[in-house]
Image (cartoon, rainbow, N blue to C red):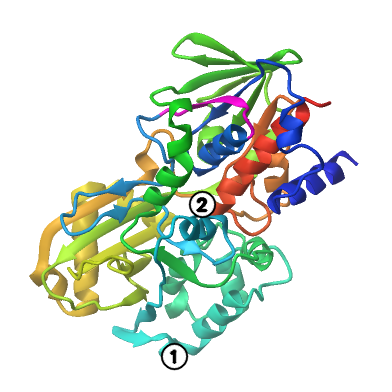
Amino acid sequence: MAQTRFRLSRWLSEFGLSRGYGSDAANTMPEGARVAIIGAGAAGLYAGKTLHDRNVDCTIFEASNRIGGRLGKSTALPHMPVDLGAEWIHGHRTLTYKLAKKAGAEILEDESELALWFDNRLSDERDMPKAFRSLYAKAMKCRGPDKDLTLTEWAVAEGLPEEQMPLLPALANDSGGSADRMSVYAAIREESRSRSGDDDYKVRDWTYFDLVEKLVAAPIADRIETDAPVEKIAYDETGVTLTIAGAEHRFDRAIITSSVNILKSGIIAFEPALPAPKIEAIGKIGMEAGHKMFLAFTADFFGSQEVIGGAIGNLYYDARIGKSSDRPTIGVFTTGERAQAMSDMGREGSIAAVIDDLDRIFGSRASETFTGETIVQDWTTEPYVRGGYSYPTVGMGDARETLAEPVADRLFFAGEAAHSDGESATVHGAMKTGERAALEAIRSFAR
């Protein structure tokens, strides 16, 4: 029954409903009650906004020197700002789409054409190799295997020829993992539960970071402390004590939004230790390397397309979509093993490797027109992130639900990895878990 109640409350909060624990429930909280939030990424910021909107005293502790988590913005390219992390609004039914509409921003659908580099030629989507096209179509229609297989295992079972296997990393890229580690069975099941919409959008001349900073973070800026890595979280029936830089800070509740890899790393100690099922769940959720790059050119040899099938980057795309600039700029988005390989190459090595890869595809036009202007964001080396985003592994089961469960009615968990209804690995999914955790924390005072 406890799990049933938990799932019901999560469902209610997902749809902005409540069983009396919204603003009215906040009025039942003890005078002076305080809630700590660990992490100022999308989940932590939205948890803070949810509490702030209900007049609940909260403080957000961010380990790094900036807000945003896996959101980030760079203005290093003189012709346009770029998103270092999340870049697309995935669907018109999402919280982030609604935020952009509320801001009066111009929302543009990304209508880039998919192109495929295979057999030493660049083809459009209709010219995909037959076997890969069949696999791709099934994945896009959420028709996966009927048992728990990795993407590589499923491809073998579907008869994908050996020469087409190098295309699999591109198919696994959106899920955030490697083809031979991610569970395509679980990934497709999760995707089938999504109700966000099928199209991707950008906001004209805004970065995703701008959207979250202006509409979510700005109203609670005075509640955020940066350069404040939490070393220990101690909890008992009387409340929660955070240790930061050797000093103890006392709160009544805590919302934890750290990435899966940070939770796995043990750099935050829990006293007492988290329950064994939660530790096991954290271990089952995958999170691998994440890497982004932007390169400027003097000639537009690329056009408005997305190219998969390269040997280095999993996805090459026209980064000008949604920007007023017409300066040719290619984005490179890579997760999983290839992202780890790019991380291992270092900045200059990864740039050279990408230019060589683009030269193979476009006949030396990349190196001939490359201006040298480049932005590289290696999320794997960010000390308080340590990777891209979560993905389902074989045998993961209901690990996401278990991660999301409160502990002792004192600790509440949020973050994209804790979203189990098809919106993990997204900003809007992370925000919804932040809202859910904040409402659970409020409700816990009434028990």
Q: Give the label on residue 342, or none.
A: none
Q: Residues within 10 Å of mark 2 (few under 14, many from 20)?
A: many
Residue at (8, 71) in percent of width and height? 368
Give the amino acid at mark 1.
Answer: Arg
What x and y, as percent, mark residue 108?
Answer: 40, 70
Q: Give the label on residue 126, or none.
A: 1
Q: Which one is closest to the eye, mark 1 or mark 2? A: 2
Q: Which residue is mark 2?
A: 427
Question: In screen coordinates, is 222 left or right of 157?
Answer: left
Based on the displayed image, in which of its 4 quarters is residue 185 positioned?
Answer: bottom right
Question: In screen coordinates, is 396 left or right of 375?
Answer: right
Tell me if residue 439 comes above or below residue 422 in the rendering: above
Mark found first going from the N terminus, 1 or 2: 1
What x and y, as percent, mark residue 199?
Answer: 51, 72
Tell me if residue 94 comes above or below residue 390 in the rendering: below
The magenta segment is 54-63
Residue at (53, 35) in percent of width and height? 258
